[in-house]
Image (cartoon, helix red, strand yellow):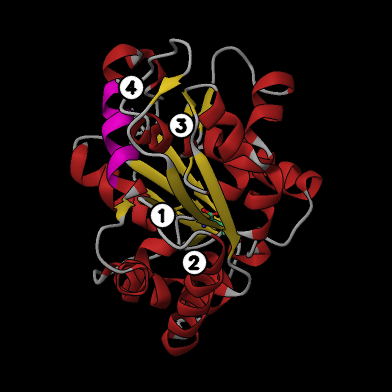
Amino acid sequence: MAVGIFDSGLGGLTVLDAVSKRLPEVPFVYYGDNAHAPYGVRTADDIYRLTCGAVTRLWDEGCDLVILACNTASAAALKRMQETWLPKEKRVLGVFVPLIEALTERQWGDNSPPREVEVKHVALFATPATVASRAFQRELAFRAIGVDVEAQPCGGLVDAIEQGDEILAEALVRSHVEALKRRMPHPQAAILGCTHYPLMERVFREALGEGVQVYSQARLVAESLADYLIRRPEFLGPGQVARFLTTGDPASVSVHATQFLRRRIGFEPV
Ligand code: DGL
């Protein structure tokens, strides 16, 4: 009954942590493509190719359902995968839609026409590839009307987080928030649209100031996955074993991952 969790690197561990707490009986197999991170500066074709390779590897682990715990892959590759590549008996889900459903006050999976919603000014912080894809705005337009989105590509931030350079990461968050606020001085909501960014959530909140609702993607993804598995239990795959796989150096990825999650994580080579 295993489920796969994919990210370009360590950021998806924020999602893994939330889904394992919400669904403790499910073995999750995590795949971090650390050797090719960050994805945020790659082309859409490159992201598509790497993501398909990782998902195929997770099928071998008995995961018929894979969560792309990576906004960049969800934005740049998921639609193409679902439309042109994915076999009928497998599912790949992204991390954008649960976030947008929460922002637009919908039930999970509600596909009714777009309508006016409470929130009007939304700040989106994401990688350059996610921002360039405009996938967030596209998915939002299917569900809500009259929402103004200001997107800030947070260049350098994933690298600083992956390298454990907290001082640089904090400085980058502050300067990216400042840059966005020059264009949208009073956002009502902020989306941390990269699974690495919750690790810097405190700094985002401080820099944004009071009165800005910050959406926590990991918890929303966990809730929507739990709901999905109730509706579609047939996509719990045959795998039985939880594992952490990486394309990078397992020893150093394990050290960083252990620092991230503040519990011991042991990665194995892909
Ligand atoms: N953590 C990923 C995301 O949510 C990928 C970041 C990257 O590799 O650039 O976008």
Tag 2 secondary structure: helix
Is 223 one of the magenta-colored residues? Answer: yes
Q: Relative to 98, is 259 above or below?
A: below
Neighbor class of circle 3 (other Cα within 10 Å; few <14, some 14-19, many 20+) is: some
Is 73 placed left or right of 189 in the picture?
A: right
Farthest residue toward the bottom? 167
Image coordinates of residue 145 in percent, x first then y, are 50, 26
- Disc 1 marks a residue whose amino acid type is Pro
Q: Which residue is mark 1?
A: 187
Q: CA distance from mark 4 to mark 3?
A: 9 Å
Mark 2, residues whose alpha carbon is within 10 Å: few (<14), some, or many (≥20)? some
> Which three-letter amino acid code belongs to the residue tagged 2?
Lys
Q: What element does badge 1 sit on?
A: loop
- Which of the two residues, 162 or 243, is positioned nearer the viewer here? 162
Provide residue 112's location: percent of width, then percent of height. 43, 10
Res 270 visible: no
Q: Is residue 230 visible?
A: yes
What's the residue type where badge 3 is placed? Answer: Val
The earlier-in-sequence mark between 4 and 3 is 3
Residue topped by disc 2 = 181
Q: Nearer the viewer, residue 248 or 135?
A: 135
Q: What residue is pinned by disc 4?
A: 108
Work out whether 17 lies above or below 66. below
